[in-house]
Image (spheres, helix red, strand yellow):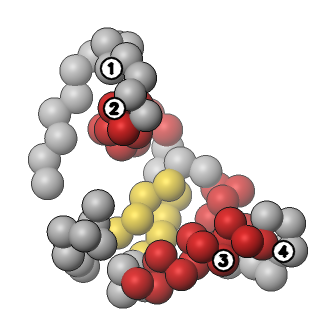
Amino acid sequence: LALSKNLVPLIVEIDSQVLIQLLSSNNLGFSHMLMDCRQLIEKLGSPQVCHIFKEANAAADKLACYGKGRDLAMGKNVLVLV
């Protein structure tokens, strides 16, 4: 979405410390998926990728659920500002 709408510069916040470590390593496990992620990050202008706690990532979680077609009625409503 950020790429198609040219929403740059941007900061990528991920609630998985393991994924951040994998993206910056030469680990061969999941290499094809990691390569896809690295290429997308490069297309986005190599934004900063940083860890954020799951509780602070509620808006992204709600949007991901919506994108998957899952029920959004889990918990509180989240206001998303772009």
- Real-space Cα distance between discs 3 and 2? 26 Å
Circle 1 residue: 72
Q: Foreground residue, 81 or 29?
A: 29
- Quickly name the residue at label 3: 35
Question: As drawn, is 78 to the left or to the right of 24?
Answer: left
Amino acid carrying mark 1 in the image: Leu
Location of residue 79 with respect to 14 vertically, above or below: above
Q: Earlier in the sequence, mark 2 or mark 4?
A: 4
Q: Earlier in the sequence, mark 3 or mark 4?
A: 4
Q: Say which element carries label 1.
A: loop
Residue 18, percent across and down? Answer: 70, 56
The residues tagged by marks 3 and 1 sit, at their Cα atoms, a distance apart of 31 Å
Per the image, the residue denoted by label 2 is 66
First in sequence: mark 3 or mark 1? 3
Labelled pair 1, 4 in contact (Cβ < 8 Å): no
The span from disc 1 to disc 4 (Cα, nearest Å) is 35 Å
- N-term-proximal mark, 1 vs 2: 2
Mark 3 → mark 4, Cα distance in angstroms: 11 Å
Element under disc 4: loop
The residue lying at 34 percent from left, 69 percent from top is 11
Q: Marks 2 and 1: in contact by CB < 8 Å?
A: yes
* Label 1 vs 4, first from the N-terminus: 4
